[in-house]
Image (tube, grey):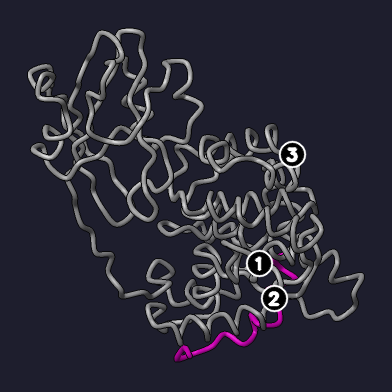
Amino acid sequence: MPKTLNSKAIVEFAPALIAWQKTHGRHDLPWQNTRDPYKVWLSEIMLQQTQVVTVKDYFTRFLAKHPTVASLANASLDDVLALWSGLGYYSRARNMHRCAQDVVALHGGAFPKTAEVLQTLPGIGPSTAAAVASLCFSERVAILDGNVKRVLTRLLGFEADLAKSANEKALWQLATQVLPQDGKPDDLWTAMPHYTQGVMDLGATLCTTRKPNCLLCPVEKLCAAKKGGNPETFPVKTKALKRTSQSLWLLWATLSDGSVYLEQRPTPGVWAGLYCLPVFDSHDALIASVSPADVSLLQDGEVFKHVLTHKDLHIHPVRLQLVEKPKQAALKIKGNWVAANAWSGLGLPAPIRKLLSTV
């Protein structure tokens, strides 16, 4: 627990935040102003580790193709991954597809109304479950994503290290305490969506990681970190991100008609389940996969770096341009030739899609 706890904020935070959200919060995002759990859930999954500006277009495209959870459940995984291509963290898309199928198969196509049951579905953790339950069904339950952790640790003067699970659990308990206290069902029906949206809005627009705009904050007078003059030191989390690097060689084989040779990546692993240029751990391994008669046709492309959350990928594309599809296998790897007008509809890793788009 923190050294000093801002007890006044426990009582006054929610009313002030709700009033601010109604007049100054965000109201123009495509997944707002709705109690449709499908739309809220879809946005919450997409917004994990991804900026709002990026998610907007993907969200719109997903809804255009799959307007209901039943439509998404009936889609093929390849179709889902193709729509997701470029958003990264592809396990989200696979879990999302499984979740849609479970909602249809186990819950009759209707999302459960409580955070406790929502968490039993694939890819839905405590915070996502709370977001859906509070925004759509007004359950009095707290979310605790990155923005909310920042807001609450500053507000309450919570100095404990969130790298320790016990401290994060303690913060979650406090997050529950600051929720709207009015026990009247009709009042909570209105208050909880405004509160949940408000705490996300506050973290995204004013209580930012660097240079928080405290002068415009609706709870400036309640904020312990503002009073202490050190809001940017919150939240405290000492665990350092360990970055690694890896070199990959890609065999970029094409035909004169524009067809490209692609393989579907194994699960688990880098780009699991996506369609990709064949990947190798070394240049020698790549050469060994090509028919000896075609080795002389190989041309090394320009090396580039692709940044993942915990790893830098140094990618070495190697071109192999063939006139026509060989009658016998010219490549000693499992894959398929994909027509020039077809590969863009597949689920491709972002750097592969960008690479193929350069020609």
Left or right, 308 with reference to 187: left
Q: Describe the element under mark 2 as helix, strand or loop.
A: helix
Q: Which residues are magenta?
A: 1-18
Tell me the residue at 72%/65% (across/down). 195
Q: Whole-Å distance between the Cαs marked 2 and 3?
A: 26 Å
Q: Badges 1 and 2: C-beta atoms under 8 Å apart?
A: yes
Local packing at callout 3 (Cα closer than 10 Å; few below 14, some 14-19, many 20+) is some
Examine the residues drawn in magenta and state their main secondary structure: helix
Position of residue 167 measured from the top left corner of the image (x, y, whole percent): 45, 85
Q: Whole-Å distance between the Cαs marked 1 and 2?
A: 7 Å
In front of the other: 32 or 15 = 32
Q: Amino acid at mark 3?
A: Pro
Per the image, the residue denoted by label 1 is 129
Identify the residue at the far front of this view.
328
Q: Describe the element under mark 3 as helix, strand or loop.
A: loop
Q: Amino acid at mark 2?
A: Glu
Per the image, the residue denoted by label 3 is 67
In front of the other: 75 or 151 = 75
Per the image, the residue denoted by label 2 is 116
Position of residue 32 measured from the top left corner of the image (x, y, whole percent): 72, 48
Q: Is residue 48 above or below residue 53?
A: below
- Between tags 1 and 3, which lies in front? 3
Left or right, 23 with reference to 211: right
Chain-order first, disc 1 or disc 3: 3
- Tell me the number on the disc at residue 189: none
Q: Is residue 173 above or below residue 47?
A: below
Chain-order first, disc 1 or disc 2: 2
